[in-house]
Amino acid sequence: MSDNGDERLDRFFAAARNARMDTSALEEHFETRLMARLRERRKEGIPWYALMWRMVPVFTVLVVLIAVYSISYKPLSPGDLFAAISSGQEEYLAQNVLTGE
């Protein structure tokens, strides 16, 4: 009984492998449908991430210009690292200590 079932299954699978699917309905007017879909997507507009990728060269040029300017422009820097934050503070603190404020 099981041999007969296995034989029937083998014949069924062989027939399924040999059968060709009819894809003519899907192939018909494929290019027309594809072009219509592309046309509809173009009407939607450019997504924000595509616009962002188009702006990358502009930002790259800006970064390069800023880097070149910062390398070429070297202001005279004092030897004291804390000069920028403490300039004039000593006199102010001494005056406050002496006056008691």
Image (tube, rainbow, N blue to C red):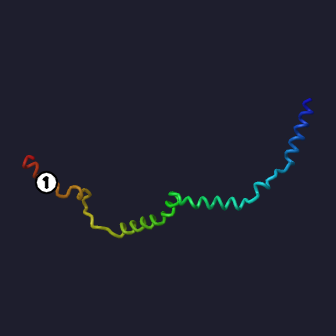
Q: Residue furthest left?
A: 99
**Image point (7%, 49%), residue name:** 99
Quadrant location of the N terminus?
A: top right
Q: Is residue 23 left or right of residue 10?
A: left
Q: Is residue 41 left or right of residue 10?
A: left
Residue under circle 1?
Answer: 92
Front-lying residue, 71 or 43: 43
**Image point (63%, 60%), residue name:** 38
**Image point (92%, 33%), residue name:** 4
Q: Position of residue 93 (x, y in %)?
A: 14, 51
Q: Quadrant of residue 40?
A: bottom right
Q: Quadrant of residue 14?
A: top right
Q: Is residue 62 left or right of residue 79?
A: right
Front-lying residue, 89 or 35: 35
**Image point (90%, 30%), residue name:** 2
Element type where label 1 sits in the image: helix
- The amino acid at mark 1 is Tyr
Q: Position of residue 41 (x, y in %)?
A: 59, 59
Q: Position of residue 98 (x, y in %)?
A: 7, 49
Front-lying residue, 84 or 78: 84
